[in-house]
Amino acid sequence: MTAVGASVVRTRRLPTVADLRALKGKRQLTMLRYFSIDEAAAAEEAGIDIASVPPEVLFHPDYRRVAPSIFSMTGKTHLEAGTADDYLRWCGDAVNRGADAVYCSGSLRTVEHLAREHIPVVGHVGLVPSRATWTGGFRAVGKTADAALRLYDEVRAYEDAGAFAVEIEVVPPEVASEISRRVGILLWSMGAGAGCDAQYLFANDILGYTDGRIPRHSKVYRDFRAEYARLQVERIAAFREFITDVETGAYPEDRHLVAMSEGEFDQFINCLEKGERRQG
């Protein structure tokens, strides 16, 4: 850490799985799901620890240039990937292209298949949108003793299968805290309280441009929807001004054009006229 004037610049390096494991129980990490290179650059500058990144963003040639120290996971559902071996090949390619870990929506058998080949795997418990029908829809999970025990068993099963972390979503905080302190696997909380190892939110919720309802567990810090609407109005106004300038002759002005010396232009005209006379 070095001081520059009145500000402090933190020198960060990309953490490893071992680094994250070593932080369990010591401090809360920050985690985002973001959707663009600009958001990745902002997360890096702000100091975000972990990110969930769509493949097309993480595999972008500029991604690691703008986000060199964010531990970045990506994923593809097992339904898209095909067989366990297909999934393994895709995950191996993702790691080779810069992913630090892979989110796995598949079975524990698939998690074990990936982990056995040393792929850093992240699972998902609690409210899992792709499996919500099995837990009663889009609602909290673990609100009864029996449901909380099943959740604990699921986390332990992920740990036994070789996953190093699980996202735990919309679970009572006391349940998540008890589970977290009884397991070695990392728990990344999305609406499951501060007793886990990381707090996880979506960038679109934080920035206020989510389509539809903002989840209860999210917090809006900025109103980008209004800003985007303002910018669209400005785009339209600028385009209309351009049209008017073209129609009235206000564009282009001399400053927008390159100049030619008078002598060179005269020579050009003479050459054209001589050519026309010859052709005539």
Image: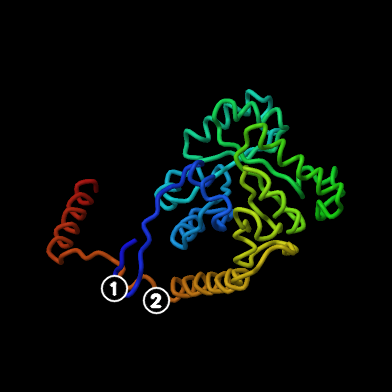
Q: Which label number is shown at residue 5?
A: 1
The colour scheme is rainbow
Q: Tag count in the figure?
A: 2
Considering only order in the chain, which callout, 1 or 2, is on the residue closer to the N terminus?
1
Horizontal and vertical percent for residue 88?
Answer: 60, 27
Tell me if 51 is positioned left or right of 213 in this view. left
Specify the amino acid type for callout 1. Gly
Depth check, front residue: 248 or 131: 131
In the rendered structure, are the residues bearing label 2 and label 1 in contact, judged by CB atoms less than 8 Å apart? no
Q: Which residue is mark 2?
A: 250
Residue at position x 15%, y 62% from top? 266
Residue at position x 40%, y 54% from top? 12
Horizontal and vertical percent for residue 149?
Answer: 81, 45
Tell me if 130 is positioned left or right of 259 in this view. right
* Corner quadrant of residue 232: bottom right
Residue at position x 73%, y 45% from top? 125
For disc 2, the neighbor class at 10 Å (few under 14, some 14 to 19, many from 20) is few
Specify the amino acid type for callout 2. Ala
Quadrant of the drawing holding the N terminus: bottom left
For disc 1, the neighbor class at 10 Å (few under 14, some 14 to 19, many from 20) is few
* Corner quadrant of residue 258: bottom left
Disc number lying in front (2 or 1): 1
